[in-house]
C-alpha cells in the first residue's frame, strides 16, 4: 500500500469537514499511510452569485477536482454525492460510499413552526434549489421563494439580512458541521420535500485503474448506502438529471427490503408526479420509475414549461 495519499477537496468548511471525516476513518484502518489534503477551487466556488442552472448545474462543484484526478495530481476526492453528475468522466469511478446520514431537508427559522401550514401567508423562504422550490410551492402556492447561495453560515445570516421567514438546508450539512442552532428553530421537512438524489451520502471518486486506492476505499464502503444511492443515480441518469427541473429520488431499506420513491415537478409547483415505495431489490428499478414518471408527464415538465 502506498505510504502517501493526496486527497482532493473543495475549500469550503463543509467540504473540509467531510474530507476529514473520511480521512479519519481511513487512518484507523491504515495507520502507516500519510493522507494530505489538496484544496481545489471549482467554478461553483468562484461564482457565488448566479444560479447553479445558469453556470452549468451540479457539476460545477466537481469538474476541476475531476481534472486533477485524471492527471494524477490527487489520488481520490471526497464529494457530497448530490453534487456529482450522473455520468462520470471516462476513467473515473465512485470507489466508496460511506454510511449515509440523514437525507432530509429542514426549515431553519427565527420563529417556531410545527408544520409548514403554520408559516404566515406569503412567507419568504430562502433556497436556490428548484427541487425544494417546486415541492414547497406545491404545498403552499403563496410562499415567496427567495434565491440564496453561499455556505451554511451565509445562508443563516440571510434570515435576518433578507428578512426571511426561514431558509431550507440539508440536515446532513448541519450535523457534519455541528452548527449551533440554539438561536433558531428547526422544522424537519421530510413530509413535504423528497430528498435530492444522493443527499446525505458522501462519494469518494478515484481513478478506475488505481487498484491500490480502490482496495483502500472499499474498506469504508457501506453496502446498504451504496445499493440505495446507485438506484437513485440510475433514476437521475435516465431523466438526464441536472438543475433544470426539480427531481427527487430516495431509496431506503425497510424490513430488509429496499424501497424507492421518485418525483419530478415543475418549478412553480403546479405539477408534481411521483411514485412511492416501489420495491427496488431487483436491478433496473431506477430506470423503471423514471420511465413511469416520463409516461405520466402530460405537463411538459421534462421539456420545460
Image (spheres, rainbow, N blue to C red):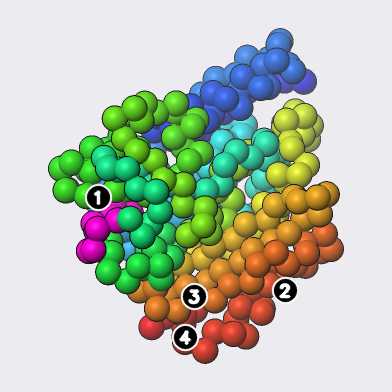
Q: Nearer the viewer, mark 3 or mark 2?
A: 3
Q: Main secondary structure of the magenta part?
A: loop
Which residue is labeled 3 in the image? 272
Q: Residues within 10 Å of mark 2 (few under 14, many from 20)?
A: some
Which residue is labeled 1 in the image? 165
- Depth check, front residue: 187 or 198: 187
Which residue is labeled 2 in the image? 288
**Percent x, y of residue 133:** 37, 63
Q: Could you tell me which secondary element the residue under label 2 belongs to?
A: helix
Q: Any magenta on residue 121?
A: yes
Q: Is residue 192 left or right of residue 137?
A: right
Q: Is residue 260 above or below residue 100?
A: below
Residue span colored magenta = 119-129
Mark closer to the chain start, 1 or 3: 1
What is the C-alpha distance between the residues marked 1 and 3? 24 Å
Mark closer to the chain start, 4 or 1: 1
Mark closer to the chain start, 4 or 2: 2
**Residue 267 is at least partly visible in this image:** no
- Residue found 39% across the figure and 63% down from its top: 136
Which residue is labeled 4 in the image? 300
Amino acid at each position: 500500500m502506498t505510504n502517501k495519499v493526496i486527497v482532493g477537496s473543495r475549500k469550503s468548511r463543509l467540504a473540509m469537514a467531510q474530507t476529514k471525516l473520511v480521512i479519519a476513518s481511513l487512518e484507523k484502518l491504515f495507520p502507516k499511510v500519510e493522507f494530505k489534503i489538496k484544496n481545489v477551487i471549482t467554478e461553483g466556488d468562484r461564482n457565488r452569485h448566479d444560479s447553479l442552472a445558469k453556470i452549468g448545474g451540479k457539476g460545477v462543484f466537481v469538474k476541476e477536482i475531476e481534472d486533477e484526478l485524471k492527471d494524477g495530481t490527487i489520488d481520490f476526492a471526497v464529494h457530497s454525492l448530490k453534487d456529482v453528475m450522473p455520468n462520470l468522466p471516462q476513467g473515473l469511478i465512485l470507489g466508496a460510499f460511506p454510511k449515509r446520514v440523514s437525507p432530509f431537508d429542514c426549515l431553519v427559522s427565527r420563529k417556531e413552526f410545527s408544520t409548514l401550514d403554520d408559516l404566515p401567508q406569503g412567507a419568504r423562504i430562502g433556497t436556490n434549489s428548484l427541487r425544494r422550490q417546486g415541492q414547497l410551492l406545491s404545498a403552499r402556492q403563496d410562499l415567496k421563494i427567495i434565491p440564496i447561495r453561499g455556505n451554511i453560515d451565509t445562508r443563516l445570516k440571510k434570515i435576518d439580512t433578507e428578512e426571511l421567514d426561514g431558509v431550507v438546508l440539508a440536515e446532513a450539512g448541519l450535523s457534519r458541521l455541528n452548527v449551533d442552532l440554539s438561536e433558531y428553530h428547526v422544522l424537519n421537512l421530510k413530509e413535504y420535500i423528497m430528498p435530492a438524489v444522493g443527499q446525505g451520502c458522501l462519494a469518494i471518486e478515484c481513478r478506475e485503474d488505481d487498484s491500490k486506492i480502490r482496495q483502500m476505499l472499499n474498506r469504508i464502503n457501506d453496502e446498504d448506502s451504496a445499493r440505495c444511492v446507485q438506484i437513485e443515480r440510475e433514476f437521475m441518469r435516465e431523466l438526464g438529471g441536472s438543475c433544470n427541473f426539480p427531481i427527487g429520488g430516495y431509496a431506503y431499506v425497510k424490513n430488509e427490503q429496499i424501497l424507492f420513491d421518485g418525483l419530478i415537478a415543475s418549478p412553480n409547483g403546479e405539477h408534481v408526479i411521483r411514485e412511492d415505495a416501489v420495491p427496488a431489490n431487483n436491478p433496473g428499478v431506477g430506470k423503471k420509475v423514471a420511465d413511469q414518471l416520463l409516461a405520466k408527464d402530460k405537463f411538459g415538465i421534462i421539456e420545460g414549461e
